[in-house]
Image: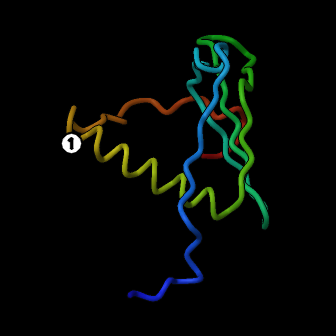
Amino acid sequence: MAADNPATPPQMQIQLQIDEQTAQGMYVNMAMLNHNETEFVIDFIYVQPQAPKAVVRARVINSPKHMKRLLHALQDNVAKYEAQFGKIDVSGALPPTLGMPH
């Protein structure tokens, strides 16, 4: 019999619940990312063309560990998307910076 690894917690299945409004999603066309020693903050923003104001539609705050897991999940999903649909073209004009450097 193989020894159990005490450092590996048992797998748990989680049932996700989502209300109807959240399930509809929220369109954003910009994100700003900030961090300090203990957390990352991502603001998801909608910028209307030719408008002087932008609206933060959601803010997500997470730990550095979770942020790195999210980064890997995003990289994996973009790679899978490009394998199925082709390379994503990101050339062209950059989005507005709201006075912040990229």
Instruction: Please tell me whether residue 15 is drawn above or below residue 13 in the rendered image.
Output: above
Q: Position of residue 48 (x, y in %)?
A: 63, 13
The local secondary structure at tag 1 comes to helix
Q: Residue at x 74, y 26 (%)?
A: 56
Total number of numbered discs in the rendering: 1
Q: Is residue 35 left or right of residue 66?
A: right
Instruction: Please tell me whether residue 79 is drawn above or below residue 7 in the rendered image.
Output: above
Q: In which quadrant of the rendered view does residue 47 lie?
A: top right
Residue 2 or residue 70, whichever sits in front: 2
Q: Is residue 25 left or right of residue 91?
A: right
Q: In which quadrant of the rendered view does residue 16 lie?
A: top right
Q: Residue at x 65, y 20 (%)?
A: 22
Q: Position of residue 50 (x, y in %)?
A: 62, 11
Q: Residue at x 74, y 21 (%)?
A: 55
Residue wearing tag 1: 83
Question: Label 1 sits on what residue type?
Answer: Ala
Residue 81 or residue 102, whichever sits in front: 81
Q: Residues within 10 Å of mark 1 (few under 14, many from 20)?
A: few
Residue 48 or residue 19, whichever sits in front: 19
